[in-house]
Image (cartoon, helix red, strand yellow):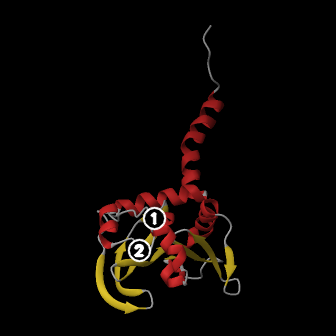
Amino acid sequence: MRFKLPPTYKLLLALAVVIGPFYWLMFTEDGRRRSDLVILHILGKPSFNIALDRLTGATTHAAIKEQFPKVDFACQARTSALGEEVCAAEIASFNGLPARQARLFYGGGRLTAVRLDYRRHYHRLLAASLANGFGEPSVEAGGTTQRWRIDGGTIVLPAERPATDDEAALMWLSPVLTGDPQRGRAADG
């Protein structure tokens, strides 16, 4: 006995095979994120998968260069409240999220702050990822920022989705900048 599928079933199955992946890529958050990552990497920008919980005020230029040799940081002396030197690079992603730029600030040759500019469309996903990894944040500055205190510093993120891409930035601050040098010494030691 030979088994034969009805033509209508074959048509529906073929449509599902063609439309299913297209629907996932275009209309689901995970599909759009993955599509954006592929396009950004095709355009030649590197990923910057940095472990925020491993950063400390003792992290140096050499450690960052060794860890991320494909990321081409351009450094310049520029005194600010975050340090005396800033190194910036265009990136495709950080930690699996589409991004635009990474800026690292150094004071006395040590890392004092990291600014990661992400695509604002992924704000909710980034906040959920941070909450999943570091617990629930404290909401500060009149409800405008979320803050996670971790062993090596503090992570700050806007509480709501930013209105523009220029405002979409995650900041990591060393204990030296947040006024908690004991926390930095414990993490460094």
Residue at (69% x, 78% y) in the render: 139
Which of these two is toward me, 56 or 86? 56
Q: Can see residue 53?
A: yes
**Image location of residue 148, percent across then percent down:** 61, 72
Which of these two is toward me, 165 or 75? 75
Residue annotated with mark 2: 102
Which of these two is toward me, 171 or 25? 171
Label 2 packing within 10 angstroms: few (<14), some (14-19), many (20+): many
Q: Could you tell me which quadrant the C terminus lies in? A: bottom left
**Does residue 25 sit above or below 169 in this rendering?**
above
User: Which numbered disc flags the more N-terminal residue, 2 or 1?
Assistant: 1
Q: Could you tell me which quadrant the N terminus lies in? A: top right
Label 1 packing within 10 angstroms: few (<14), some (14-19), many (20+): many
Residue at (70% x, 83% y) in the render: 143
**Does residue 76 sit above or below 117 in this rendering?**
below
Q: Amino acid at mark 2?
A: Ala
State yes or no: discs 2 and 1 in contact (Cβ < 8 Å): yes
Q: Can see residue 169?
A: no
Residue 159 quadrant: bottom right
Indicate left or right for 149 with 109 as reference.
Answer: right
* Count of marks, rendered view: 2
**Does residue 53 sit above or below 177 in this rendering?**
above
User: Which numbered dot is residue 110?
Assistant: none
Residue at (54% x, 43% y) in the render: 18
User: Which numbered dot is residue 94?
Assistant: 1
